[in-house]
Amino acid sequence: MPSSTAHVETPRPERYIKQLISHMSHRATAELADDGRGTITFSQGTCVLIPSPGKLSMTATAGDLASLTGVQDVVTRHLLGFASQEELSVEWAVSSTQGDVRLIDPVVGDYLLAHCTPADELLRELAAETRAATGGSAGMQVSHDEGVLLGMLARMTGARRAVEIGVFTGYSSICIARALPADGRLIACDISTEWTSIARRYWERAGVADRIDLRIAPAIETLRALPAEPDIDFAFVDADKTSYPAYYEELVPRMRPGGLIVLDNVFLGGRVFDPAFQDESSAAMRRMNEIIVDDERVDSVMLPVRDGVTLARRR
Ligand SMILES: C[S@@+](CC[C@H](N)C(=O)[O-])C[C@H]1O[C@@H](n2cnc3c(N)ncnc32)[C@H](O)[C@@H]1O
């Protein structure tokens, strides 16, 4: 479905949203949320209005480009009418994302998979069993190239103490645990005994079960119960997206200087780029990405690996 966005600089975004909502409610469904956002649903499409300091962001969505232009035009015309005292510049840009960014062309993705250290027999079996046993949920498993990256990063950090949030059937935990020394420890957090029962079997077979301490509980509880000292060398976050900011805040003070936090899915299938997505997960992931960028405790970089991976290294 085509969509477009306009970011309009103005000191009065809330006021214009209220005026647009009030006026449009006579001819369309127009709603104002408690947080100041407005949504107008016309017969040919929708416009979401989002206020932020000094800016009004508008996202129009419609079934086809002609209807999209119709939505843009009616909102622009009324906005300019309400803003007679200031000169607003309203430039609509058709979104190329439509909420589902294919950052990596499948051909490139296959090439990347074929050009990293190959999965051994055990990891291939685990991937196959995960597909057979968990069906549609199997897509949650890290891809093999990301698993290699995790192992390499854990090794390069010289990690002894590691934490994983989001175990599933254990692929990423095997990649991390294999990178730890024999006396290393991976605290692995999940809430599913069913999925982690598969992980446990493969940890045994991989010879890393004695390095992995599985904690079945909401990960935030496990993290809060960890010692407050900064003794974690490596952390991988790959669980419920709305909790990412809370996980990060518990992890950062516990990371030793030079310790690395790796966060998966920071693009959230492209939804972080598109303001039309205002669901809880998209909002939390956008907040997470902003928090890290502004956080003076870490150096960070975002990598276009699969669904986006952020590396945050404790200073
Ligand atoms: C994307 S999967 C993890 C995939 C895993 N890293 C792998 O490579 O196979 C997310 C996991 O997070 C777990 N999870 C969801 N909410 C959680 C929570 N509040 N605390 C701990 N784990 C949670 C789910 O049970 C699921 O196994």
Image: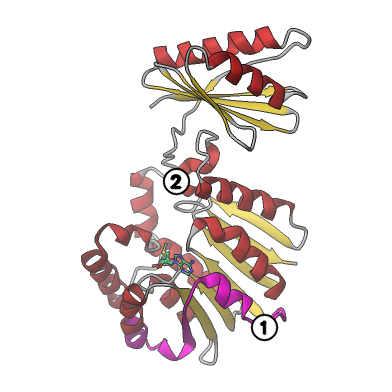
Residue 307 placement, left or right of 126: right
Q: Position of residue 194 (x, y in %)?
A: 32, 75
> Mark 2 highlights which residue?
269
Q: Give the range drawn in magenta.
A: 202-230
Q: Are marks 2 and 1 in contact (CB under 8 Å)?
A: no
Q: Of residues 77 and 143, which is closer to you in this image? A: 77
Residue 203 seen by the camera: yes
Q: Nearer the viewer, mark 2 or mark 1?
A: 1
Q: Does the magenta stretch include residue 206?
A: yes
Up/down of 262 relative to 301, above or below? below
In the rendered image, which quarter contains the C terminus? bottom right
Label of residue 227 in the image: 1
* Residue at the left extreme, as displayed: 132
Q: Disc 2 on helix, strand or loop?
A: helix
Q: Of residues 120 and 137, which is closer to you in this image? A: 137
Q: Of residues 208 and 80, which is closer to you in this image? A: 80
Mark 2 or mark 1, earlier in chain = 1
Q: Quadrant of residue 42?
A: top left
Give me the C-alpha separation between circle 2 and circle 1: 34 Å
Which residue is depicted at the point 44% across and 46% down? 269
Crowd band around label 1 with a 10 angstrom C-alpha radius: few (<14), some (14–19), many (20+):
few
Label of residue 307 in the image: none
Badge 1 amino acid: Pro
Please tell me how many numbered marks the rendered image carries: 2
Q: Of residues 42 and 65, which is closer to you in this image? A: 42
Residue 169 placement, left or right of 270: left
Which residue is depicted at the point 27% across and 57% down? 136
Up/down of 175 relative to 95, above or below? below
Q: In which quarter of the image is residue 86?
A: top right
Q: Position of residue 260 (x, y in %)?
A: 63, 69
Up/down of 315 relative to 12, above or below? below
Residue 91 seen by the camera: no
